[in-house]
Image (cartoon, grey):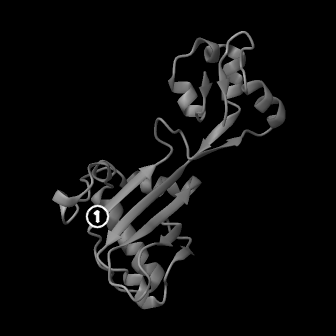
Amino acid sequence: VVLALPRRGLELISVPALEEPTARELVTSVTGQHVMKLFCCYDEPWWSQLGITGGPSGTDLPIGQVWYFGPDSSSNESSLLLASYNDTLDTSFWEGAASGPRYQPSEPADADPHWLEQAPSALMVEQAQAQLAQLHGLSTIPNPYSAAWIDWSQDPYGGAFNTWNVGVDADAVAAAMLQPDPSVPLYVCG
């Protein structure tokens, strides 16, 4: 068996070979890093009026990074905006705004069910809209017709990526983690 799981995924499954103290120590040698993404869909790419056709913008506002996707600046077709991509400390701002009523898409009948399951709170979209307007020097921007978000620190992920803990011999842990118990045909990668 080969398990390609992050730390939190390994902690959530019940496998005797991974519950041994030595294996637990190997698993906990990394820490999951918080990352959150918030996507907004707009009827048209309002940012193209500012000369933005794609790529990222960065800010010290809690939205962190903004990525522009969709048609080029000459098109008025629907467009997707990664309205917030942030990690580590900036995620705490969004955690505080995550509860409450969900943002409702303007055309719920056409919405993808998985997309609806990832609906952010109305407060998150309101905050993102205000920060996007501020970032772009606009008084207002159009409301998104739909939005979705994911917080990669939640189960079963435990973080979008893992980093080695201070003082860990990464080469030794990586080698030992490949097969935590040599008597069991269980392997871990990733």
80 lies left or right of 31: left
Secondary element at tag 1? strand
Image position, residue 31 (x, y; %): 64, 39
- Tell me the quarter of the image containing the N terminus: top right
Residue 119 higher or lower than 167, as above or below: below
45 lies left or right of 87: left
Residue 151 higher or lower than 59, as above or below: above
Image position, residue 92 (x, y; %): 49, 53
Observer-nearest of 6 and 159: 6
Image position, residue 86 (x, y; %): 53, 60
- Tell me the quarter of the image containing the C terminus: top right
Image position, residue 140 (x, y; %): 32, 82
Q: Quadrant of residue 45?
A: bottom left
Identify which amino acid the numbered label 1 is placed on. Ser
2 lies left or right of 40: right
For the image, the number of numbered tags is: 1
46 lies left or right of 26: left
Residue 43 higher or lower than 150, as above or below: below
Which residue is identified by label 1? 146
Residue at 72%, 21% (x, y): give it.
179
Residue 132 higher or lower than 188, as above or below: below
Kindly give the residue lying farthest to the left in the view shown: 109
Residue at 33%, 64% (x, y): give it.
125
